[in-house]
Image: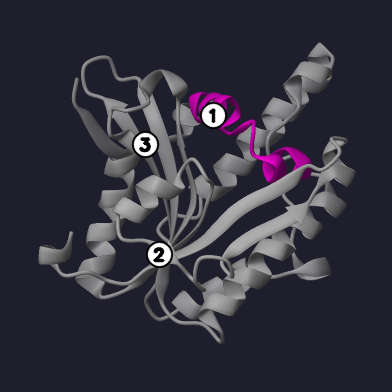
């Protein structure tokens, strides 16, 4: 069953949230910050509110087009959404300014509705600080903010399609791409030409979020990766 890449529509957001929660619930950072709502431990009314907030956060991203490309991989036979990706295109006249606003830290970092303020600023500041190390004063590039595949659609190439959609455009513009990869995603990103930004050990993002998750020794485990623009013969 072939898959096609399309832009996410507002009616897709409940399905996007379900994929997000199902596939990313083991990511400590997202649990700690409240990006992933803890629906199982909430009463019905609180769970409904948490879902509303989570969908509102995705809607805000959706409304950021054309800077942000919110994509879905769709099963062409039944229309089911298999995976989604959020690509930030920090390119063009305002690209660097947009990036600088995106990587704010500390009290300057705006917390989306429904997230834990302290945990969000702690975790995302750590990531943004590392991101700033890669790009210094800033330059044009593409950033993969999120890639998630529903477990029922794994090994169908959905992730590759969502990556290729942006990588081809980055190569045409001669721009780098950037992401923070999980251990699960690392092999796919490596195959697509991403490398550790600072070498094998210095690119690791490893910090404790147990204060916010309540699980002793709960660590964020990410690798900062970049991909130089490639010629067609390198892909």
Q: Which of label 2 and label 3 is nearer to you?
A: 2
For image coordinates 22% across by 59% down, the residue present is 168
The residue carrying mark 3 is 72
How many discs appear?
3
Disc 3 is placed on an element classified as strand
Residue 210 picture location, percent across and down: 84, 43
Residue found 69% across the figure and 57% down from its top = 206
Question: Are the two marked residues, 2 and 1, in contact with CB atoms closer than 8 angstroms?
Answer: no
| Quadrant in which the C terminus appears | bottom left
- The location of residue 38, given as percent across then percent down, is 76, 27
How far separated are the C-alphas under marks 2 and 1?
24 Å
Element at label 2: strand
Residue drawn at 49 percent across, 71 percent down: 199
Based on the displayed image, in which of its 4 quarters is residue 130 positioned? bottom right
Looking at this rendering, what residue extends furthest in the left direction? 233
Mark 2 or mark 3: whose residue is earlier in sequence:
3
- The residues tagged by marks 1 and 3 sit, at their Cα atoms, a distance apart of 15 Å
* Magenta range: 15-33
> Which numbered disc, 1 or 3, marks the residue that appears first in the sequence?
1
Residue that extends furthest to the bottom in the rendered view of this protein: 137
Q: Is residue 165 left or right of residue 151?
A: left
Give whichever of discs 2 and 1 has the lower sequence position: 1
Chief secondary structure of the magenta portion: helix
Badge 2 is on which residue?
A: 195
Position of residue 192 measured from the top left corner of the image (x, y, whole percent): 30, 54
Find out whether the residues at labels 2 and 3 contact each other: C-beta distance under 8 Å. Answer: no
CB atoms of marks 1 and 3 within 8 Å: no
- Assess whether residue 194 is covered by the magenta stretch: no
Vertical arrangement, residue 172 with respect to residue 52, above or below: below
């Amino acid at each position: 069953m072939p898959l096609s890449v399309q832009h996410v529509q507002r009616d897709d957001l409940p399905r996007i949230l379900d994929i997000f929660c199902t596939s990313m619930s083991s990511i400590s950072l997202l649990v700690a910050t409240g990006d992933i709502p803890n629906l199982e431990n909430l009463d019905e009314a609180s769970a409904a509110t948490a879902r509303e907030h989570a969908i509102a956060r995705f809607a805000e991203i959706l409304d950021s087009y054309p800077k942000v490309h919110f994509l879905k991989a769709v099963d062409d036979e039944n229309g089911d959404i298999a995976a989604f990706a959020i690509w930030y295109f920090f390119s063009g006249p305002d690209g660097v300014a947009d990036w600088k606003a995106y990587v704010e830290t500390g009290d300057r970092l705006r917390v989306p509705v429904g997230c834990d303020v302290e945990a969000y600023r702690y975790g995302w500041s750590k990531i943004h600080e590392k991101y700033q190390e890669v790009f210094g004063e800033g330059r044009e590039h593409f950033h993969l903010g999120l890639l998630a595949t529903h477990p029922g659609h794994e090994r169908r190439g959905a992730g590759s399609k969502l990556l290729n959609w942006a990588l081809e455009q980055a190569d045409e513009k001669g721009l780098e791409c950037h992401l923070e990869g999980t251990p699960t995603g690392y092999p796919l990103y490596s195959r697509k030409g991403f490398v550790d930004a600072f070498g094998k050990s210095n690119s690791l993002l490893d910090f404790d979020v147990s204060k916010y998750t309540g699980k002793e020794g709960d660590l964020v485990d990410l690798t900062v990766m970049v991909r130089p623009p490639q010629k067609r013969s390198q892909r």
